[in-house]
Image (cartoon, grey):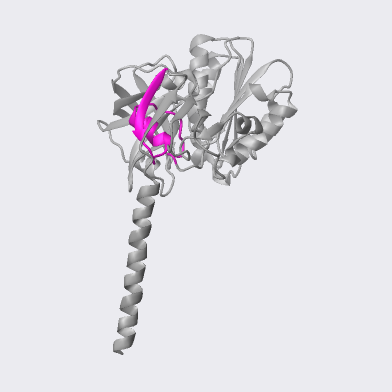
């Protein structure tokens, strides 16, 4: 009995000793010292003790680049071009890269750890992204699980964004603050407010946080981000396709369009499951009466008898295929779940839209 206890004690002591040795070795191996990060050929430079991700180091310096997943390596948005340093690309990064990006040294900032001096390139517009403080000025229930939340800016007091861009809300998480991306639904003419349309995701850190906000609460977000670029040519027809909370960038695009070009041709395609998921329909129907070149197409994929729905049924890509005329130059903006994006993109390409005329966000 004593021998057995002694044996267990010796074994435990050996494991503890090995663990201590490994911890010490890891600390020594991971001691990369002070590393210099150079941005855009010296436009900005800073030093940071090695061992942290490039994304976190940039955020510490108030350099905010997109990261819709909050740095978890699942969105592929935090791309930077590495000119020097960085080592070999990781297997966790390659699924998000095109062949040209792999050749061009593009990396994910959330996966790239600073272990040596780095020289990187960022789009100039990202260096202009700011951190904002704002107060909740209005909360409105749109459906049983979707809220419209309006923020009044405090500092800075104004924001300038393009139609369809997004911000990243900072929400408290179990391991510290997290950032999640939400498209701006307000028109670009409103420089003092940011409006979001947020669906409550069960267990979602940020959506739960936003759905529990009340008027007067303070929030922090960064932005604006996004590659949506509305054509300045009023003869180019706009096609907007979405579903659920994907209404946010679409609302911004449509409202901004008709504030600037009252006679521009624009079509809205919006998919819902049933009438309990429908919102903004009356608003858009009124807008269509004021602007005859605006066409509205809602479709229900699972309408009930109680819905008394007389419009399109089925998934929204079927409505796009049914109503969209392939003639004339068009630009399309999509926002919704990936299967919807993929199905609609196939239809649009069959309707003669080029890749460069199709924009989408999948978050």
Compared with residue 202, is residue 230 higher up or lower down, i.e. above or below? above
In percent of width and height, residue 340 lies at 61, 38
Judging depth in this view, the residue of 49 and 61 nearest the camera is 49
Q: Quadrant of residue 357?
A: top right
Quadrant assignment for the N terminus: bottom left
In percent of width and height, residue 162 lies at 48, 18
Asked whether, in this view, residue 111 is left or right of residue 159, the answer is right
Compared with residue 93, is residue 333 higher up or lower down, i.e. above or below? above
* Residue at x-position 50% and y-position 10%: 260
> Which stretch is magenta?
43-71
Judging depth in this view, the residue of 124 and 139 nearest the camera is 124
Q: Quadrant of residue 238?
A: top right
Asked whether, in this view, residue 227 is left or right of residue 315, the answer is left
* Residue at x-position 62% and y-position 41%: 339
Compared with residue 14, is residue 200 higher up or lower down, i.e. above or below? above
Q: Is residue 236 visible?
A: yes
What is the count of numbered marks?
Answer: 0
Q: Is residue 115 magenta?
A: no
Q: Is residue 57 magenta?
A: yes
């Amino acid at each position: 009995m004593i021998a057995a206890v002694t044996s267990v004690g010796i074994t435990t002591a050996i494991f503890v000793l090995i663990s201590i040795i490994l911890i010490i070795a890891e600390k020594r191996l991971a001691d990369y010292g002070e590393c210099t990060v150079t941005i855009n050929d010296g436009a900005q430079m800073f030093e940071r003790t090695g061992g942290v991700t490039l994304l976190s180091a940039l955020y510490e310096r108030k350099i905010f680049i997109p990261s819709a997943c909050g740095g978890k390596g699942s969105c592929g948005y935090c791309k930077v071009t590495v000119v020097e340093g960085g080592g070999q690309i990781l297997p966790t990064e390659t699924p998000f890269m095109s062949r040209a990006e792999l050749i061009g040294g593009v990396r994910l900032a959330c996966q790239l750890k600073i272990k040596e001096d780095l020289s990187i390139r960022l789009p100039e517009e990202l260096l202009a992204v700011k951190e904002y403080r704002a107060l909740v000025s209005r909360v409105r229930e749109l459906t049983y699980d979707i809220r419209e939340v309006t923020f009044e800016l405090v500092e800075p007091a104004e924001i300038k964004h393009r139609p369809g861009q997004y911000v990243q809300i900072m929400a408290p998480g179990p391991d510290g603050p997290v950032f999640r991306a939400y498209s701006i639904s307000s028109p670009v003419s409103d420089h003092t407010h940011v409006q979001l349309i947020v669906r409550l995701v069960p267990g979602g850190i940020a959506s739960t946080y936003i759905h529990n906000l009340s008027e007067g609460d303070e929030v922090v977000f960064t932005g604006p981000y996004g590659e949506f670029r509305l054509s300045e040519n009023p003869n180019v027809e706009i096609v907007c396709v979405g579903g659920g909370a994907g209404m946010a960038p679409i609302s911004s695009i449509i409202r901004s369009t008709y504030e600037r070009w009252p006679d521009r041709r624009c079509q809205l395609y919006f998919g819902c499951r049933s009438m309990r998921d429908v919102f903004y329909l009356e608003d858009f129907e009124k807008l269509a009466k004021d602007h005859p070149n605006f066409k509205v197409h809602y479709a229900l994929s699972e309408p009930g008898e109680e819905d008394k729905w007389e419009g399109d049924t089925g998934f929204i890509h079927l409505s796009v295929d049914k109503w969209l005329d392939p003639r004339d130059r068009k630009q399309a903006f999509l926002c919704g779940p990936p299967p919807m994006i993929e199905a609609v993109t196939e239809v649009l390409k069959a309707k003669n839209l080029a890749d460069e005329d199709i924009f989408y966000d999948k978050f």
